Image: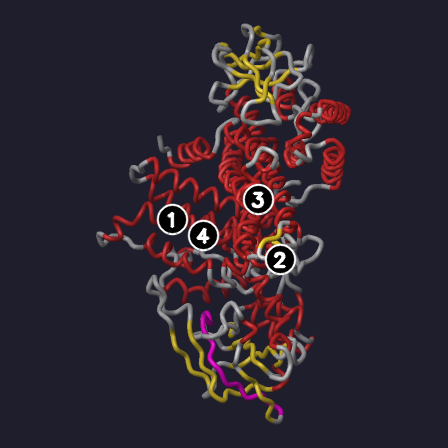
Amino acid sequence: MDFLDAPDEAEFRERFRTWLADQGDAIKRSHSDDEYWTSLGDWHHRLYDAGFFALTWPKQYGGHELPATYEVIVDEELAAAGAPPKPSLGYLIQGFSRHGSDAIKERFLPGLINGRDRWCQGFSEPDAGSDLASLRTTAVRDGDEYVINGHKIWTSYSDVAEWCIVLARTDSDVPKHKGISAFAVPMRQPGIEQRPLQMINGITTEFGQVVFDNARVPAENMVGEPGEGWAFAMTTVSHEREPHTLGFAARYLKAVHDLEAQARATTLSSAQAAELAWAFTEAEMLRLHTARRLSEQLDGVKHGPEGSIDKLLMTWAEQSVGHAALALGTASAIAGGSAEGLDFYLYSRAQSVMGGTSQIQKNLIATRILGLPTS
Amino acid sequence: MDARPTLEQRQLEDAAVRLIANHGVQAVGDLDDAARRSKLDTALEQAGWRELRTGEPGEGPAASGVEAALVARVLARGAADTAFVGPLLDHDLLRRAGVEPDGGPFTIAVTSDLGALATDPAGAVAVDAAGATAALLAVPDGAGFRLATAAIGEPTTTVDLTRAVAQLAGPATPIDGASLTADDLLAWESLAVALTAADLVGAMEGAITLAVDYARERRQYGAPIGSYQAVQHLLAEAHTLAEGAYSAAVHAAWAADALPPAEARQAAAVAKAYAARAARTVCETSIQVHGGIGNTWECMAHVFLRRSLLATELFGGDGPQLALLAHERLGAR
């Protein structure tokens, strides 16, 4: 067990740190306003062009084929520099890699990895949240195409995306988990309507609703076989639950560093100091847990239920940081001062819902990991 | 970077698991089985794990903090009622002063609140004192500290039914050896705190396994209680807390050797603060899942809870650790 950098890792860390120091205005200080979210596309291009994104992916698709633990270095240095996290795309890349044909991978992975194509994920529906398999969006074959009708929600970045990975029912005569297929659907077409959602912290650009009204997609854009959509979705969400896929340990440590800088300029009560020290403890725990998980991938990526543990730990970490932000900033925000901490807190409430609620994660941990009987 | 245990570390862990399977505490009644405890003690002595942190003067310890933490975790998981962390930390401190262990078995003396290594015999208590005849403390000496020993009284169990505590029964007698700096003691304390975090991880895992097994067997309303989400969620949360605590604890044990003392001490504070809060929730959850039986003496759940109460206070629980982090990182009082 060794948490220190090997010589190659140390060289990479130094190179990345030097590059980060030159990024200037690209490193925004705010966490969660609309400007931040829209600037993430630019950040993706910068990271990719400089060779600091898609570290572990095949060179064939624009990756660097480095060991998984290099992602720890990226997260740590992003946090230390106060930079935005890396783009959260690893879970989609996992889904394509595991279920897509070679033709699908060659067609879509390079654009996904280099940031040329922006993607959103059309999974949840108004009546299919935790019970995703009950989704009602349909895809009906029509010659060389499928025609899609339905309503998706919580579709992150649907307003800027060129592509949506849509789960749709292609067979209603089989059990609900077996009749779903996945499609790479072009977003810029007449049959698709955007409806932005405003979240409790005021942002409008992250989450959207997407309505498909006779939208069309070429049959060759199906990812995996007909009926393989559920397996695709499970691969995707299992990785969407992993903090190392999302780069969120960096996001929380950056937030803690910002709060600490704010705290040093003022006098904290001992209760506030303890709340902030606890947020640091949670964020550090997540960094170390991430290092452990990525080390476990040095011999190959696993697709197990452990992501549910990681998702809960990540949720608790984010919400602890949110509580510290609240403890330090509520009064000034209410009085009209900086509301940044309040925004972080409000945004943190979504973490125990998005990517599968905490309740669902606990169901999975209890039955798939602890081996408790299903009722 | 590779945060996984090495092959040798996994083999050591497996050996500890076997030792516990043979001689550990499976039921509360086992605590009264002196013959079993004697076998456990002998097996641990023969394994040489209390000497993991010995070493020739001027050289490093026989094994890193990670090995010590992995053993501490497995012993706690099996509610091992024999001394380990105390003698190991005694040896570690002696090594730092360049002193060969002589005239043991020893353990360490801590302040009356259990929060720090004792620097004065008045009010100090020896912890993890089963089988020990004396305890080690560090008395101020000029700008540094000099090690001293004090005889101890008859060890007795207190809140923790698996580990003995003893009052000091004599004055502190300085022993030959190098003077230790505050940094030397900080490095030692980092290991000590990390090992109590690892002990808490093991106690949590023992309490969780106990409760999961019970939830599979115990039936109400015609089904195992473990099939109900209300119970499942308690156990899932407990398991997740233990996993997070493990990730931080092994890092702290590694850091005790690999990072400068001030950084190692922060890593230890993170691990201990997390493990202490987690362990209380987890052990209380184990009692809750057991229902009424969980509140009886015969259920092992309170043995793990009690062990975690001592491990939490030893070198400071979440309160002191968070205060240390706030002080170090923010300059807060």
Which mark is in front, 4 or 3?
Answer: 3
Residue type pointed to by label 4: Glu
- Do pointers 1 and 4 mark residues of a single chain? yes
Residue B16, quarter of the rendered image: top right
Q: CA distance from mark 1 to mark 2?
A: 30 Å
Number of the label disc, if any, that sits on residue B197: none
Give the vertical position of A154 relative to B173 (above or below).
Answer: below
| Residue A151 belongs to magenta span | yes
Residue type pointed to by label 1: His
Which residue is at 43% across, 52% downward? A319
Residue carrying label 2: A367
Residue carrying label 1: A323
Residue carrying label 3: B290
Left/right of residue A70 with respect to residue A158 in the rendered view: right
Give x and y (percent) for residue B154. 60, 13
Q: Which residues are magenta?
A: A144-156
Considering the image in quadrants, where does the N terminus of chain A appear? top right
Residue A374, quarter of the rendered image: bottom right
- Do pointers 3 and 1 mark residues of a single chain? no
- Do pointers 1 and 2 mark residues of a single chain? yes
Residue type pointed to by label 3: His
Secondary structure mostly taken by the magenta-highlighted segment of the chain: strand
Which mark is in front, 3 or 1?
Answer: 3
